[in-house]
Amino acid sequence: MAGRSRNISVSEASRPVLPRHARLKFDETRQVWVILAPERVLAPDEIAVEVLQLCDGVRSVAGMVDQLAAKYSAERAAISADVIAMLQDLADKGFLTEAREKTS
C-alpha cells in the first residue's frame, strides 16, 4: 500500500475530523467510548474522548486547546503539546483526517 498514505501532520492550524469510515460511539455493553472503523476498534481514554468530541472538522486544534485550557484552568502550552501528540498518534493510525475546505 505504498503511496496511499493520507496521514496528516497535526498542528494548531489543523481542523481534524474522524474519517468517513470511523465513528466515535458509546458502547453500552462495555460502558466505554470506542472508535469503530472497518475491522478495528479503539477504546480511547476519557480525556481522548473529550478531545475527539471536539474534532468536528470546523474547530481548529488551537480552538480545542483554548477551550480545554479554560475548562481545566491548565497551562495552554502543556494542553497544546498533549492534544497535538494524541491527535497525531490517532492520525498516524488512520483514525483522523484533515477537514477539507469546501470550494463551492
Image (spheres, rainbow, N blue to C red):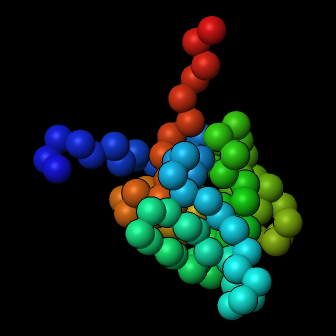
Against 98, residue 51 (above or below) is below
Residue at the (63%, 8%) spot, across then down: 104
Against 8, residue 69 (above or below) is below
State the image coordinates of residue 86 (x, y, percent, origin top left): 51, 67
Residue at the (72%, 60%) spot, across then down: 53
Along the viewing direction, whichever of 15 and 18 lies nearer the viewer: 18
Along the viewing direction, whichever of 96 and 20 lies nearer the viewer: 20
Along the viewing direction, whichever of 78 and 46 lies nearer the viewer: 46
* Whether residue 78 is visible: no
Residue at the (51%, 75%) spot, across then down: 42
State the image coordinates of residue 81 (x, y, percent, origin top left): 53, 63
Against 70, residue 98 (above or below) is above
State the image coordinates of residue 13 (x, y, percent, origin top left): 56, 38
* Whether residue 33 is visible: yes
Residue at the (69%, 68%) spot, across then down: 25
Along the viewing direction, whichever of 36 and 14 lies nearer the viewer: 36
